[in-house]
Amino acid sequence: MRDLFAVVMMSGIFGLLSASFFVAMDAVDVAFTEASVGAGIATLLMLTAVTLTGRSEDSERHKPMWALVVVFITGGLLIYGTLDMPYFGSSQAPVHLHVAPRYINDSMQETGLPNIVTSVLASYRGFDTLGEVVVIFTAGMGVLALLRVESRPGIDQTMADTIFYLMHERHLILRIVTKLLLPFILLFALYVQFHGDFGPGGGFQAGVIFAAAIILYAMVFGLPTARRVVNQTFFRLLAAVGVLLYGGVGVVSMLNGGNFLDYNVLADDPVAGQHLGILLIELGVGCTVASVMVIIFFNFSGRREFP
Amino acid sequence: MILGLYNYWIVVVLMMIGLYIVIAHGNLIKKLVGLTIFQTAVFIFYISMAKIDGATAPVLAEGISQYSNPLPHVLILTAIVVGIATVALGLALAVRIKEAYGSVEEESIQNKDNQEC
């Protein structure tokens, strides 16, 4: 396929399909994330990048035979490797016999949360998640360093007025439906954020949904209008505050005499401490993810206006 | 029954499609799409490993005794969001390359570099 627009659309469909596959595999939290990331934000970012780099691929390209050979050899070896693996769906596979039973049996007493994925993510493997959040933060800063655009107030003002005028003239249904939907999307993001302890959800998903709402607004009402509503400096700060909040919870638990990110010491009762710790670090994750996604989108599409 | 491994074979096929795109296509955006396919194949691999026949999603509830393994879910959940952040970084690099070289095709970038030497 030479048309990159079609390629990006296909990859969005692929993301949605894999999300439905994850539901079938009982991984509801993962499906949630993949649906909002793979089918939503990833497609959007790729589209913006395609508008910046050109829509069609060069057709003058010989297909190297050796690439096919390498791929077939690697694939063959990997399939040979799977022959030793336990069968799909078997409950006696080694992966299910170690660590996982402890999470399933003890997490209710230790953290008091029904969603095992959240308690493992935020409590048992809290250190790991801190690392992931720092990676996301760093990636956001990298995009900022590569693509940063300073908004120019004069141009912004006239463009905002033009787009505002255009929006009120045309796209009536789109405008009204977006305005109707926005509060519900934001509310849903907050629900996902704070209900993540009990059902599928959590900071990662909520952050992406929150960012999606802002991106929707920016797409329908134009970037300059969105820039006036959404303060860029605030989001840059928020990205850092999220990581700091996460790390700060760790430091506070150290000051209270526990290990780093050991929430048992945050309150008198260990379970209440776990609740508090998990709530706070999920909030930190949500802040960082949402603001990094917003920063990435705004800098990508800002690049198109002022190259 | 050897067919019990079919899930892993599908993963291998997807992974190899991704790898082939990364090697054979010169367009940097297409390479990144290939990389996402490769990435998703790894996600599917982990999630397939976590599945237990007859088990449910790992949210504790009354009257359910068997849950799928939550640990791979956690690993992949974070990996997806980290994946999009790193892909965004890659796209940003591609945009800058476009601005500097006027193209995102591997060959014309190479030609330009050779001319300058």
Image: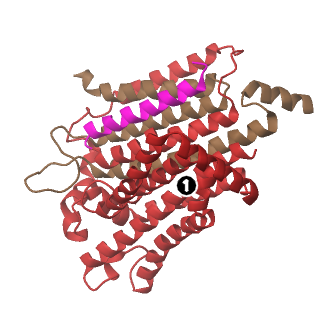
Chain colours: A red, B brown
Residue nearest the observer in this picture, B36 or A79: B36
For mark 1, what is the residue? A294
- Element class at badge 1: helix
Q: Residue at x 43, y 30 (%)?
A: A13
Quarter of the image with the C terminus of chain A in it: top right
Q: Amino acid at mark 1?
A: Val
Quarter of the image with the N terminus of chain A in it: top right
Q: Chain of mark 1?
A: A
Residue nearest the observer in this picture, A148 or A117: A148
- Vertical comparison of A54 with A97: above or below: above
Q: Residue at x 45, y 63 (%)?
A: A285
Report x, y in % for residue B10.
Answer: 37, 25
Indicate yes or no whether the magenta region holds residue A74. no
* B99 left or right, relative to A29: right
- Vertical comparison of A128 with A88: above or below: below
Report x, y in % for residue A305.
Answer: 70, 45
Report x, y in % for residue A74.
Answer: 51, 25
Q: Residue at x 67, y 55 (%)?
A: A144
Question: Which portion, as a residue range, is magenta?
Answer: A1-26
